[in-house]
Amino acid sequence: MTDPEQPLDLDHKYALDRDCTTLSRHVLQQFQSFSAEAQDLSALMNRVALAAKLIARHLSRAGLVEDALGFTGRTNVQGESVKKMDVYANQVFISVFQESGLVCRLASEEMEDPYYIPENCPIGRYTLLYDPIDGSSNVDINLNVGAIFAIRRQGSEDLDYSGKDLLQDGHQQIAAGYVLYGPSTMLVYSIGKGVHAFTLDPSLGEFILASENIHVPDHGPVYSVNEGNFWQCEESIRNYIRYVHRHEGYTARYSGALVGDFHRILFQGGVFLYPGTIKKPEGKLRLLYESAPLAFLIEQAGGRASTGLQNILDVVPDRLHARTPLIIGSKEDVALVESFIQEEQRERQEQEILASKGN
Ligand code: P6P
């Protein structure tokens, strides 16, 4: 029997303290208060964690459960074929936030318009924006997938239920994070006070603090881009790829799931890029629930996120599912990619000046 007068030895005490540093407690520690906002954010993160646990459980049994894998036969607002796991994960977030009193609206990659939870409105002062399954092309082959989320305060009225008030820059995010469904399930988040990673302990059913105040290295060896798009990219991006091919110290890593590629770069440094192409100058990734949340995180971790011409967090979307090119990671590596884009801009302007003089 442990005598409470006899303190635990330090190893046991450390292990106990760590196992008690759950996500909801960590959020309160971050605020260093029990204010209404702190309690709200703690409760919000706890709901996100519940969604992550439900989805992790479904993913871990997907090969055994009827109707968990494969396509639904439908396409979403993005024009992408919808996986059954996309639908399931999207519904999990809806179910988890109903009756929460916290979130009045959900804006998802899988839904054309924001989803309103009337019983939470107008008391619910927050909107959750999320990609319920990022990298769903990996689901059927049991490779890592993720979820990306951002929390915004409901600012102005949304009387016409259009969600127009969501069309604001990324500095309006009050929290952001992602879940990585890999060998372990991790949840990484920030409320603007550093970036912190939690690992799901299945035996506890809790996300336990694993890394606090993560800092992305100023430079790293990894460049992450789909080189299959090489000939569809602008010449500047092709020149960047030629550069890393020809210089020592670079290695390519690309998983087909943004969350996994981003997670590697957050911990090891480097750069992920999904640039615009000649046919799709705006690129593939969506601003409000993919690029902006990750930009929030990477800046909190000392890195950068850019469209190539503008910081991602400064971009104001013109529609809910607006896309942007994304260059994100270590500040030196993002700057290197931008230097090729700026060089091409300069050359184009010089040619235009010469052409105008020639006329
Ligand atoms: P591509 C997944 O569909 C996703 O949105 C990101 O997770 C991923 O980085 C990207 O698209 C992969 O796109 O065109 O390389 O298959």
Image (cartoon, helix red, strand yellow):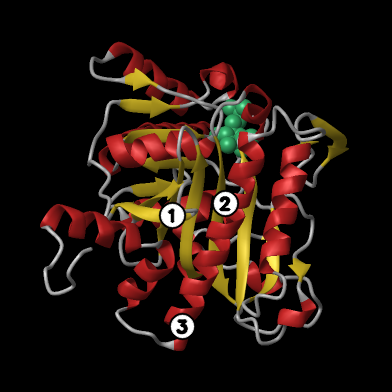
Q: Label 2 amino acid?
A: Ala
Residue at 72% across, 43% down: 86
Of 314 and 217, the residue lying toward us: 217
Question: Residue under circle 1?
Answer: 207
Identify the residue position indicated by label 3 in the image: 37
Where, quadrant-wise, is the N terminus in this rendering?
Answer: bottom left
The residue that appears at 78% across and 29% down in the rendered structure is: 70
**Residue 217 in the image: x percent, y percent?**
23, 41
Q: Is residue 241 left or right of residue 155?
A: left
Front position in the image: 254 or 320: 254
Q: Earlier in the sequence, mark 3 or mark 2?
A: 3
Mark closer to the chain start, 2 or 1: 2
Assess disc 1: are there few (<14), some (14-19) or many (≥20) residues with their C-alpha within 10 Å of its C-alpha: many
- Say what amino acid the circle numbered 3 marks: Glu
Asked if one can make out residue 357 in the rendered structure from this viewpoint, the answer is: no
Q: Please say if 255 is above or below 185.
A: above
| Residue positioned 51% across, 19% down in the render | 227
Report helix, strand or loop for mark 3.
helix
Locate residue 117, reporting x and y percent.
76, 73
**Sequence order check: which comes first, mark 3 or mark 1?**
3
Q: Quadrant of residue 94?
A: bottom right
Residue 119 lies, with reference to residue 177, above or below; the image says below
For mark 1, give the secondary structure: strand
Query: Which residue is identified by label 2?
Result: 52
